[in-house]
Image (cartoon, grey):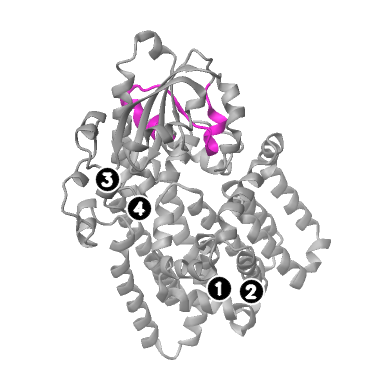
Amino acid sequence: MNKIFQRKEYLVIFIFVLVKLVIHTIINKNAGFDGDEILHIESGNHPAWGYMSIQPLVGFLGWIQNLFNTESVFIHHLFAHIASILIVIVSGLTVIKLSGSWKAVLLTLTCILVAPGFTLSHHIFTPLVFEQLFWLLSFYILVSYCKENQPRYLIYLAVSLALGFMAKISILILIAGVGVSILLYKRELFTQKTSWLALFVFLIIILPNLIWQYQRDFPFVQHMMALHGKMLVNIDFIDNLKLLFLTTNPFTVFVWGITILFGPFIRYTRNVRWAVVALFSSFIILVVFRGQFHYYFPSLLIAFCVGSVIIESFLKSNDKLLWIYILILLASGVFLTPKVLPILPLEKYIQHLNLNNKKHSKSEQLFFSQQSITDNKTVNKDDRIPINFEAYYTHNDWLNLSKAVNNIYQYLPVEKKKNCYIWTRCYTQASAINLHGKRYNLPEAFSQHGNCYEWIPTFDTSATIIVIANAESPADSLGIGSFFAPSFEKLTWKEAVFCPYSRTSTNAFYMLYLGEGLKYDSDSLKLMYQHYIFE
């Protein structure tokens, strides 16, 4: 490929990197933190070789971000944005490695840009963006091996897959796909020293996490079993397929669909068939094991690269069709993006989707004290304007929750303040208070839920506990409190915080209690509530 085309391809990649950065900047300005990512931010305060529900890489990156000691959305999205930029770059390089021209690069990166599921997962600090990066990087290395047949690529592949494992367990699906492809096309690898060296490198990198998992009876297996029993087994195939089409933009199906259906069997992929079959096998494994729609994102990201090269080859004699298709993709992206991403400020988003069609004023208020709720009995879950994207509204909710906790904490006697903790039912609340509560010097918050189970502070029965749970209305105070009540001599409802934009009615209120006469110390509470880790 001549230098002129090379420059064009790199120029396309550079332009899309700039566009990505602009989009992330806009979203950072309009939104706060997603519910799960605030747990990952908290994980950075407890660096370890493993966690109850995630792999250690996110916790390590969170630890680096937490060195800035800030609540800044930009800082806590720093590594997610870096990963998303690397995804754009590696996607373009993969197309080039597959012998695609700048037009194929343009088609691939357009598909990524207009697929709202990718833009959203590339924005928030969760394992999803790193999962996609290492799937894509591993595929790029596979293609390089297919093209050049250099043994060193097997070592590179081992490192990439190992880092992918440390980011998210799902890389095992790609590893299984590679294994199937080796059995079909590359059985001679079993006799090569470099292959066994690569396996050794892979195991050495992941060994610390395996030791951590072994010492705790493999919580990632328990997590997957709980997830399968409560969610995956109940997934409706058609509904899941609809979500996959919508989140990846229905118009991109022609690109990734041609890869999944025909990629392993057509002459355009003959010289990289081993890599394409590995991708195909991974996709089939996901289908068989009923993966949620977003589990397919890494494989579809790779399929964009392969499919763009195939489509470019098909349309080589008719560029007009390719340009028309790219324009349709861009138009669909302009239409979908404001509906499914925090591109617009909250008020304009509500207006754009005509969500504020309720003639009331309570939804405009962000904080209700116990007294105001008692005085105004009409405040309830129906006063919400439900919004799907937590990042739009949870920042305000968590700040208001921290303020409400502070209202209780500041009125405690000095001696009780010295031995006070905050106990939440869900990991998001505990993590949010530990991040935003610093401005009020609040005591440590803990939960038995998810990763937080490992971080429960040590205290005895003399501790005073501020308790937090969610409810549909303040009238639920006694029922919700019953989850915690057996652990106290006295549990008193103190405060309620209305969440006017909460996605579900069960999260319409934060209920705050003061627990006194604690019956169990921290170690006993861990044993009592260990069944709740993966709920």
| Res 389 label | 4
Q: Is residue 320 above or below residue 68?
A: below
| Res 272 label | 2
**Tag 1 residue:** 98
Residue 449 forms part of the magenta stretch: yes
Q: Nearer the viewer, residue 159 or 337?
A: 337
Residue type beneath disc 2: Val
Q: Position of residue 22 (x, y in %)?
A: 30, 56
Q: Position of residue 430 (x, y in %)?
A: 43, 33
Separation of residues labelled 2 and 1 (CA atoms): 8 Å
Labelled pair 2, 1 in contact (Cβ < 8 Å): yes
For mark 4, does the 10 Å Cα neighbourhood hold few (<14), some (14 to 19), or many (20 or more) residues?
Answer: some
Which residues are the magenta region? 431-457
Q: Residue at x 71, y 43 (%)?
A: 204
Question: From where the camera sits, is residue 295 visible?
Answer: yes
**Tag 3 residue:** 500
Q: Position of residue 425 (x, y in %)?
A: 46, 35
